[in-house]
Image (tube, grey):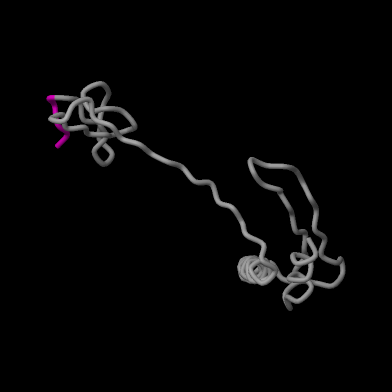
């Protein structure tokens, strides 16, 4: 939490008063949810300040050896037999549900134009 607060204190867009605060909000799925509350002098500085803070926090975490674990998903696709062609559309096997082509639904045997 000290690295996050330090990043805010070093940013020229962040006001000294009220001072930046870091809060441990909650436990997430395999994560700790931390929130930085910092004030800026001009609303037009909001997006640049957010970007600068994110970059500075990332640099400080890397320098401290803090690694952010991002979720990983494994997707396994199996066909029912060697000759079967599996077409996935809209999360379903083609032929059982509608397949989506662009913004039009396509039903088996009735292709969208």
| Residue at the outermost top position | 96
* Towards the viewer: 102 or 97: 97
Specify start and end residues of the magenta stretch as a single range: 109-113
Name which quarter of the figure residue 52 lies in.
bottom right
Q: Along the line of sight, which residue is nearer the eye, 17 or 79?
A: 79
Total labels drawn? 0
102 displayed left or right of 84: right
Q: Residue at x 23, y 30 (%)?
A: 79
Examine the rendered structure and indicate whether residue 18 appears above or below residue 106. Answer: below
| Quarter containing the C terminus | top left
| 96 w.r.t. 112: above or below | above
Answer whether residue 2 is magenta in the image. no
Residue at image x 75%, y 67%? 3
Secondary structure mainly formed by the magenta segment: loop
Whether residue 70 is situated above or below residue 74 in the rendered picture: below
Question: Where, quadrant-wise, is the N terminus in this rendering?
Answer: bottom right
Q: Residue at x 70, y 68 (%)?
A: 64
Q: Is residue 62 left or right of residue 95?
A: right
Which residue is found at the position 62% from the left and 59% from the top? Answer: 67
* Image position, residue 18 (x, y; %): 86, 66
Q: Quadrant of residue 7?
A: bottom right
> x%, y% of residue 61?
67, 66
């Amino acid at each position: 939490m000290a690295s996050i607060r330090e990043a805010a204190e070093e940013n020229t867009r962040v006001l000294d008063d009220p001072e930046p605060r870091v809060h441990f909000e909650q436990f997430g799925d395999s994560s700790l949810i931390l929130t930085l509350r910092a004030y800026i002098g001009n609303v037009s500085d909001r997006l640049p300040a957010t970007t600068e803070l994110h970059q500075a926090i990332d640099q400080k975490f890397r320098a401290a050896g803090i690694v952010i674990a991002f979720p990983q998903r494994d997707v396994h696709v199996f066909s029912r037999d060697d000759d079967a062609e599996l077409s996935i559309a809209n999360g379903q096997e083609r032929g059982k549900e509608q397949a989506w082509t662009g913004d039009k639904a396509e039903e088996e045997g009735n292709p969208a134009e």
